[in-house]
């Protein structure tokens, strides 16, 4: 004789909710295993949640990987003295080059970018007052996506064009071969994410 458990409607709903949560956790665990660092996974999450897929997702992750030394650094290693006096970056006062050197994974640079990112993301001047906040992993990911969404996305139609994407992020094309290799690796290894 087979006995069946009698459940109320609310018990069924609760079990369905628990099952859905377990599936979601299992999927998140699977994706976390695909990435080499928690920071890389956070970059994936913000890009994916904002609609980046395929070549665009690969390009974003590759550029972040290159600029951050494979997700190790969230602030430019160089002291920023080479940005002193760069009016195109908003570095109009002595010390701004050092203060507003590259921050985040994509390494936004210059007072102008810090100001725009700060107001667009937070609605206040916190990144201008405390540029070191870009060293925080959540802020590093947020400012990198801000840069991508405001500076890269509007200018790129084909994200497989590594030259075009790189030229926007690094006009001197420094590290182009590595950026291209990383982009193609992401496209090959993560084409279904």
Image: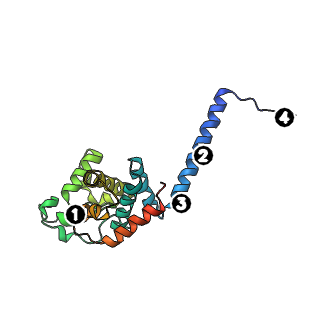
Q: CA distance from mark 4 to mark 2?
A: 28 Å
Left or right? Give the position of 157 relative to 181.
left
Question: Could you tell which of marks 2 and 1 lies nearer the N-terminus?
Answer: 2
Question: Could you tell which of marks 4 and 2 lies nearer the N-terminus?
Answer: 4
Query: Disc 1 marks which residue?
Result: 99
Q: Nearer the viewer, mark 1 or mark 4?
A: 4
Q: CA distance from mark 2 to mark 1?
A: 45 Å
Q: Nearer the viewer, mark 2 or mark 1?
A: 2
Q: Secondary structure at mark 2?
A: helix
Q: Residues within 10 Å of mark 3 (few under 14, many from 20)?
A: few
Quadrant where the N terminus lies? top right
Image coordinates for residue 159, horizontal then vertical, percent: 33, 57
Q: CA distance from mark 4 to mark 3?
A: 41 Å
Q: Give me the disc on residue 2.
A: 4
Question: Could you tell which of marks 1 and 3 lies nearer the N-terminus?
Answer: 3
Image coordinates for residue 171, horizontal then vertical, percent: 22, 66
Q: Residues within 10 Å of mark 1 (few under 14, many from 20)?
A: many
Q: CA distance from mark 3 to mark 2?
A: 17 Å
Q: Residues within 10 Å of mark 2 (few under 14, many from 20)?
A: few
Question: Could you tell which of marks 1 and 4 lies nearer the N-terminus?
Answer: 4
Q: Nearer the viewer, mark 4 or mark 2?
A: 4
Q: Residue visible at 66% across and 31% down? A: 11
Query: Disc 2 marks which residue?
Result: 22
Q: Secondary structure at mark 4?
A: loop
Q: CA distance from mark 1 to mark 3?
A: 36 Å
Is 148 or 182 nearer to us in this picture? 182
Does the CB distance between marks 4 and 2 fall below 8 Å? Answer: no
Query: Disc 3 marks which residue?
Result: 33
């Amino acid at each position: 004789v087979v006995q069946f458990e009698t459940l109320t409607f609310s018990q069924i709903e609760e079990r369905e909710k628990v099952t859905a949560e377990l599936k979601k956790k299992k999927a998140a665990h699977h994706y976390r295993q695909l990435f080499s660092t928690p920071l890389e996974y956070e970059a994936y999450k913000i890009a994916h949640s904002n609609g980046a897929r395929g070549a665009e997702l690969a390009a974003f992750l590759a550029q972040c990987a290159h600029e951050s030394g494979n997700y190790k650094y969230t602030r430019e290693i160089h002291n920023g003295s080479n940005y002193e006096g760069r009016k195109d970056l908003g570095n109009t006062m002595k010390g701004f080059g050092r203060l507003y050197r590259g921050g985040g994974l994509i390494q936004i640079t210059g007072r102008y970018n810090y100001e725009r990112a700060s107001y667009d993301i937070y609605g206040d001047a916190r990144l201008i007052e405390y540029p070191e906040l870009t060293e925080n992993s959540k802020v590093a990911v947020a400012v990198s996506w801000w840069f991508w969404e405001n500076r890269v996305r509007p200018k790129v139609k084909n994200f497989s064009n590594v030259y075009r994407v790189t030229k926007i992020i690094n006009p001197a094309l420094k590290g182009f071969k590595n950026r291209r290799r990383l982009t193609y690796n992401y496209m090959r290894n993560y084409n279904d994410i």
